[in-house]
Amino acid sequence: MKPGGGSLNENVETVTDAGADGPGANSLDFESRVGHLRAGYENSQAAVRFLDTKAAAVVGGIPVILGIFTTVFKWALDAELGASIFSCVVGLVISVIFSLTMLLLAWLSLHSAFQALSPRNTGEAQPSVLFPYRSSGFGQRLSFFTDGKASEETVVEDYHRQITRMSEIVEAKMDRVKSAIRYLQCLLCVGISAVAVLALVAAFG
């Protein structure tokens, strides 16, 4: 929002017009532009922290979920040992099949979660004072600010580069967190289905 209460679209149009025709009466001043960019960068940092929290929750939750279902499977198999041989064999086969499926889903979910915590292939970043990204131009870029050569437009451009980089990181993290949660949901569905099938075998076996 612009300090006057205008919408985001109006701000975008104003900045676009100012870039095309030069500073006008309705263009944002330097402080307003930097303030808006700073807010955008802080929002992207908040998104990164939120996604990291969700990824960490997946990593911490999977061992707990596997432990619970392992206990249930063991209890079901122990209960079927006193039943018929058919029930015991069927229960064992079902437990093995579902357990292998759950382990695969758990691995996929953990893999996606760890990728979210440390994403790769997040795009090519231009050097800024924050993201050198192994660029030989980082030192030159930084010297603009340390030597007092940076103009207002240089500051705005640097914010642009930083926000672009953060947007790439947020997108990569979001995709991987979505995958981790999707695999975790499948893991829960398979586990619940396994418990239901084992209960039916015990009841009718």
Image (cartoon, rainbow, N blue to C red):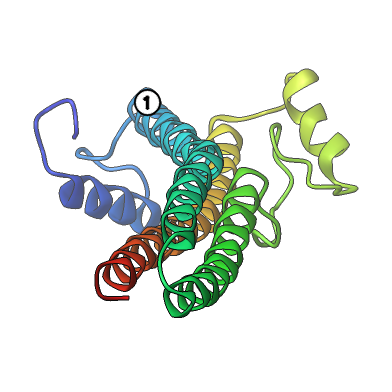
Counting from the top left corner in percent of width and height, residue 193 is at 33, 68
27 vs 173: above or below: above
Task: Name the quadrant containing residue 146.
Answer: top right
Which residue occupies the extreme left position in the image?
5
- Residue at (42% x, 74% y) in the render: 87
Pick the residue in front: 87 or 164.
87
Secondary structure beneath disc 1?
helix
203 vs 20: above or below: below
Taking the image as shown, residue 164 lies to the left or right of residue 33, namely right
- Residue at (79% x, 47% y) in the render: 133
Tell me the amino acid under the disc marked 1: Gly
- Residue at (44% x, 59% y) in the render: 82
What residue did someone put label 1 on? 35
Taking the image as shown, residue 130 lies to the left or right of residue 196, namely right
Counting from the top left corner in percent of width and height, residue 69 is at 45, 50
Q: Assign the C terminus to one quadrant of the image.
A: bottom left
Pick the residue in front: 165 or 198.
198
Which residue occupies the extreme right position in the image?
136
66 vs 60: above or below: below
Task: Name the quadrant containing residue 43.
Answer: top left
Pick the residue in front: 32 or 88.
88
Label 1: few (<14), some or many (≥20) within 10 Å? few
Taking the image as shown, residue 69 lies to the left or right of residue 152, namely left
